[in-house]
Amino acid sequence: MPYPKSTLIISVYKDTDALGFIFDSLERQTLLPDEIIISEDGDSTEMATYLATQKNRFPNLVHLTQEDDGWRKNIAMNNSIKAATNEYLIFIDGDCIPYSTFIQGHVENSQKGIVLCGKRFELGAKFTDKIKNHQLTMLDLEKKFLWHLPWMVKDGARHVEEGFYFPSGSFLSNKTKRYVNYIIGCNFSCYKEDFLAINGFDETYRLPSVGEDIDLGWRFRGLGIELKSCRNNACMMHLWHKKRFAQEEGIINNKILKVNFDQNRFVCENGLIKS
């Protein structure tokens, strides 16, 4: 059975350096995405200038912008879903660098009615600096993961078990699969038609966390669209940075979630289509 044509949607905000490492990884993919959408929650001149230099490298590159008016990632993501020309959508964040097998890990496990949920391992500050300063390549870290592992742990890396790559269908891959409780917004994929069924991201969320991941998971399941793990098949590395989220933001977003949850509102009212 042939793989579906895929669109990779990368959520970004100003960080062209991290995006450059993602592009380097995309050039090494064992299976290339058919389209790449840069979903910018803003309209940075620096980002536009940088992406103009990448068009020859990636002819299938699309750059979507919007007014920089606070956190409006969900609006940007919905615009990207509308713009996507392919049937299968893969979502990553702009501070996460995928392994060379990442796109293949999603597409070869794709099924209609299923959301594939991956994870990430989080680098510490020193290893992030090594990558940013070109003292260490992502490919070297990926291929020699066990060699670097003790030093990464010493540097404060988190969730390092997610950095082990196992081919889809292999014994180790099957042994590491677990029940998926929720989507992690930096690493998931599904058929576009399944995202349309829940009316996309809920644009009521205007602060980070919950609305870009947890809210999606329970709404998908409410419509019978199941969450399935692709951990260790579609691996990625998160670059260290200071945490930007405040506890108050989670409280506000959880209130929105509770209202929708109590009303079994699986299809959001303020999504791709406004009701």
Image: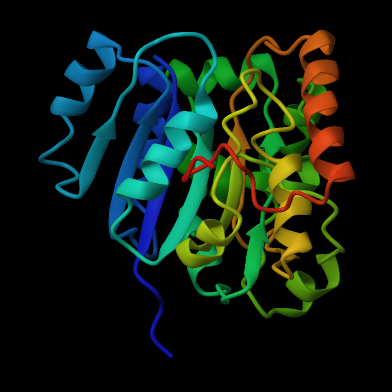
Q: Nearer the viewer, residue 91 or 146?
A: 91
Up the image or down, 24 lies above or below 47; here it is below
Up the image or down, 108 lies above or below 183; here it is below
Up the image or down, 207 lies above or below 203; here it is above
- How is the structure coloured here? rainbow
Image coordinates for residue 199, horizontal then vertical, percent: 55, 51
Quarter of the image with the C terminus in it: top right
Image coordinates for residue 56, horizontal then vertical, percent: 10, 40
Quarter of the image with the N terminus in it: bottom left
Any part of residue 25 in sight: no
Q: Residue at x 69, y 59 (%)?
A: 232
Q: Nearer the viewer, residue 222 or 113?
A: 222
Quarter of the view holding residue 6: bottom left
Residue 184 placement, left or right of 99: right
Q: Nearer the viewer, residue 176 or 67?
A: 67
Image mark count: 0
Q: Residue at x 65, y 52 (%)?
A: 267
Residue ranking furthest to the left: 56
Any part of residue 207 in sight: yes
Q: Residue at x 70, y 58 (%)?
A: 220
Image coordinates for residue 196, horizontal then vertical, percent: 51, 58
Image coordinates for residue 260, horizontal then vertical, percent: 79, 40
Residue ranking furthest to the bottom: 1
Residue 175 placement, left or right of 97: right
